[in-house]
Amino acid sequence: MKNKIITAATILFLASCSVQLITPTQSDVDRVKTKYPDYTLAELNEGKALYEQNCGNCHGLKKPSSEPEGEWKEIVPEMTEKANKKGAKIDARQQELILKYVITMSNATVSR
């Protein structure tokens, strides 16, 4: 009985730690057109995939809305450098896609 309670508590804890990222849409791209004029939905989705694969590989993912734009501009380059020192191969283009993704989605509406 005790093992079942511990197992159930562990499952609930792990489920509460997982972040459900919002699926990007064209309206997200349109919202940042003044900031990123040539940005596409494909690039936004590539940034999301890179974020999930690389950032989620070392630690739990943060919701993009958890940090303001200025913080993301500091966090992403620092984390890219750390990840690359640990063997990741995140190039400048990929870093930019991750940064544009988290900045774009930091202002996305949560009601989707």
Image: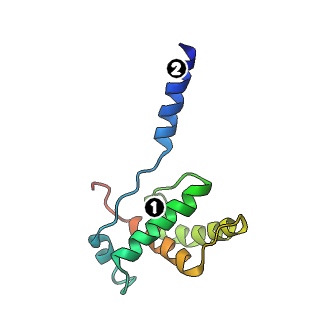
Residue type at mark 1: give it: Pro
The CA distance from mark 2 to mark 1 is 33 Å
Q: Please name the colour scheme applied to the rendered image.
A: rainbow
Q: Residue placed at 41% from the left, 76% from the top? A: 43
**Label 1 Cα crowd, 10 Å radius (few <14 / some 14-19 / many 20+):** many
Q: Are marks 2 and 1 in contact (CB under 8 Å)?
A: no
**Label 2 Cα crowd, 10 Å radius (few <14 / some 14-19 / many 20+):** few
Taking depth in this image into account, of 67 and 11 the one nearest to the observer is 11
Q: Position of residue 2 (x, y in %)?
A: 56, 15
User: Can you identify the residue that label 1 sits on?
Assistant: 64
Q: Where is residue 108 in the image (x, y as percent from the top left)?
A: 34, 64
Q: Earlier in the sequence, mark 2 or mark 1?
A: 2
Q: What element carries label 2?
A: helix
Taking depth in this image into account, of 74 and 95 the one nearest to the observer is 95
* Figure quadrant of residue 29: bottom left
Residue type at mark 2: give it: Ile
User: Can you identify the residue that label 2 sits on?
Assistant: 5
Q: Quadrant of the C terminus?
A: bottom left
